[in-house]
Image (cartoon, rainbow, N blue to C red):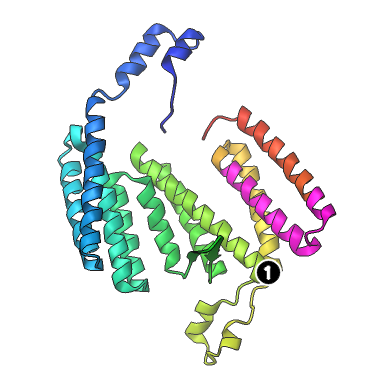
Amino acid sequence: MKIILDISKLVEEGKLTREEADRLTALAAHDTGSFGVNVLIGFGVVAIAAGAVALVPTPLTAVGLGLALFAAGSAITINRVQQWILLGQICLVIGALMFGGGVIAFGAGSLASMLIVMGAFGIAAIAARSSLLMALAVLAASACLGARTGYSHAVYSLAIFEPTLTVMLFSALALIAYQASQRLSADCERLAITAARTSLLLVNFGFWIGSLWGDPLMLMRSMNAKDASLAFMTKIVIPASVFSILWAVVLLGAGIWALQVNRRWLVNLVAVFAGIHFYTQWFERLGATPLSVLLGGLVMLASAVGLWIFNRRAPAV
């Protein structure tokens, strides 16, 4: 776990002795002078890669450049060239992102392309110790189930076509990743926690979509059904009310557990999605009337004050 401390201020306040401050300073990275050089070279690599793709804008160009950058980053990382380690991580991340974008464009977003990208991001995340790539690997896994996001003028959209499968699969992934984080080294623990947290976000998104429209279980029914008509495949099997009740129960259980073990991130996540769930069901049933807006705002303000008090008292975990 990384933390940021103002050493000088802590010494002035008497919370650290001068000897403790010197020891913490000595434990910090020694080669800070190479940081700026690494960053500048990294920006140069990004600019060259972007320019090359712009000159030859094809998916195969992005795939080729991505593989080349990934190979260069891997060579630096594997050989443990300490003064260039940041550059190696930059090359790994940019290379993986370019490769993933090229594969998705070449495969037109097909299931096979998303599976390839998921695997590539997962491997690159471990090699580069990149939480960003680990989160993207989990998101790529959700895309294999049809999860999508979109944007048009002033409108953002989220589509999850398999809420039940999303909830079940990513709940299992979150549990596995969390259990694995208890047994891994510090760097790998961070990656496992990132995977678990991203999975929990997807679980809540699955509940959210399900609580609004239910779930016709299209994927599972399409594997067995003889009648593949649109009317049959879109008929709701699990009603929205089931998702709504289960989501509330899961949020309550997760919140109680997070409080008991002092997991502040999870407490905040539960608070955010509890607010989303509350407002969704509140206005779905009461409508947007002046009284419902007033009462809803008062409830959220009370919840925000409670969360603020908890965050002030609890350590960051």
- Residue 5 % position (x, y): 44, 22
- Residue 34 % position (x, y): 22, 29
Q: Is residue 287 above or below residue 2?
A: below
Residue 185 appearing in the image: no
- Residue 77 % position (x, y): 20, 42
Q: Quadrant of the N terminus?
A: top left
Front-lying residue, 209 or 57: 57
Displayed quadrant of residue 103: bottom left
Q: Is residue 70 above or below residue 84?
A: below
Does the magenta stretch mainly form a helix, a strand or a loop? Answer: helix
Query: Relative to 229, is 121 on the left or the right?
Result: left
The residue under the point 20% across, 50% down is 48
Location of mark 1 (residue): 240
Query: Relative to 21, is 299 on the left or the right?
Result: right
Q: Magenta region: which residues?
A: 266-294
Q: Residues within 10 Å of mark 1 (few under 14, many from 20)?
A: some
The residue under the point 31% across, 44% down is 129
- Residue 278 % position (x, y): 71, 54
Front-lying residue, 83 or 141: 83
Front-lying residue, 79 or 91: 91
The residue under the point 47% across, 13% down is 9
Query: Relative to 187, is 292 on the left or the right?
Result: right
Is 99 inside the magenta-drawn segment? no
Disc 1 marks a residue whose amino acid type is Ala
Residue 101 appearing in the image: yes
